Amino acid sequence: YYPEYYHFLSELYREMRLEQKCLDVLNKGLEVDPRSTMLLIDLAGYYFRGHRPTEVDSLINVVMDIDSVEPYAFMYKGLLADQNGRKQAALDYFERFVKINDRLPEVPIIRKRINSIVLELRDTTATQ
């Protein structure tokens, strides 16, 4: 069993915009290995793109129980917090994401969001 097979196949289907096939492959992979953090993160991403925050949060909690330093878990926690207006929590999660692995492809985008949040929090504090 190689979780990478399911990961790459789901990515292919996602790029081809075959969303149901992407979901089916991820679920099949998780039937084989329900503790694959790679596949759990992929599924969280699928649900995040589908605007299903409750499912994302549940999956990320499972990931964090398995691997407490999985960087993408912190990224998704930050994205969810940011969407809910919890700026300080989002900032904390994003900073942890970057600290764990600053070479991931999402880091530049997350760093820009960190800068924006810092400015938003500063502006909020200054007006109070």
Image (cartoon, rainbow, N blue to C red):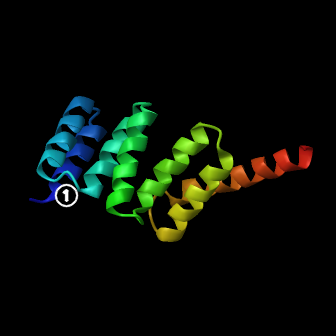
Above or below, 105 relative to 34: below
The quadrant of the rendering that contains the C terminus is top right
Horizontal side, residue 70 vs residue 12: left or right: right
Q: Residue 34 in the image: x percent, y percent?
A: 20, 51
Which residue appears at 29% of the width and 32% of the height? 17
Is residue 113 in view? no
Horizontal side, residue 119 vs residue 101: left or right: right
Counting every numbered tag in the picture gives 1
User: Which element type, helix, strand or loop, lies under badge 1?
Assistant: helix
Q: Residue 126 in the image: x percent, y percent?
A: 90, 49
Horizontal side, residue 51 vs residue 62: left or right: right
Rendering quarter of residue 36: bottom left
Which residue appears at 39% of the width and 57% of the height? 64
Q: Residue 94 in the image: x percent, y percent?
A: 57, 57
Residue closest to the eye, 73 or 103: 73
Residue closest to the eye, 106 or 69: 69
Which residue appears at 23% of the width and 51% of the height? 7
Horizontal side, residue 15 vs residue 85: left or right: left
The quadrant of the rendering that contains the N terminus is bottom left
**Residue most extreme to the left:** 1
Rendering quarter of residue 13: top left
Q: Residue 29 in the image: x percent, y percent?
A: 16, 48
Under mark 1, the amino acid is: Glu
- How packed is label 1: few (under 14 Cα within 10 Å), some, or many (20 or more)? few
Is residue 53 in view? yes
* Residue identifier under label 1: 4
Which residue appears at 91% of the width and 44% of the height? 127
**Residue most extreme to the front:** 65
Above or below, 91 relative to 98: above
